[in-house]
Amino acid sequence: MIWIIDDASKTVLPVPLRSDEAKAARNLFMTRAEAEATLAMELAR
């Protein structure tokens, strides 16, 4: 599993590495903490 930021819902989601969601994602994250920190920075802008 890999972590992505879902732009539509502004949430962090786990998805399979080779899934369509992972291929379409702007960024892929190895850990949930990385994804949540990035999302927090994006929302703070």
Image (tube, helix red, strand yellow):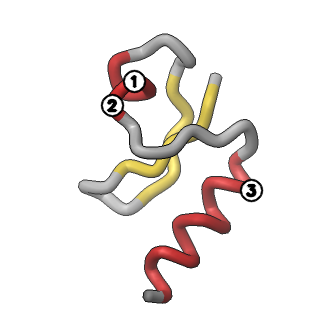
Alpha carbons under labels 2 and 1: distance apart: 4 Å
Q: Position of residue 30 (x, y in %)?
A: 72, 37
Asked where in the image residue 36 lies, by quadrant, the reply is: bottom right
Say above or below: 17 vs 28.
Answer: above
Q: Which residue is mark 2?
A: 24
Alpha carbons under labels 3 and 2: distance apart: 21 Å
Question: Which comes before the other along the chain, label 3 or label 2?
Answer: 2
What amino acid does circle 3 point to?
Answer: Ala
Closer to viewer: mark 3 or mark 2: 2
Residue depicted at x 55% and y 34% = 14
38 left or right of 31 in image: left
17 left or right of 11 in image: right
Q: Do the residues bearing badges 3 and 1 touch, measured as CB atoms within 8 Å?
A: no
Mark 2: few/some/many CA within 10 Å (<14, 14-19, 20+)? few
Residue depicted at x 39% and y 38% = 25
Marker disc for residue 33: 3
Q: Which residue is mark 1?
A: 23
Q: Position of residue 1 (x, y in %)?
A: 64, 22
What amino acid does circle 2 point to?
Answer: Ala
Residue depicted at x 51% and y 51% = 12
Q: Do the residues bearing badges 2 and 1 touch, measured as CB atoms within 8 Å?
A: yes
Q: How many marks?
A: 3
Quarter holding the C terminus is: bottom left
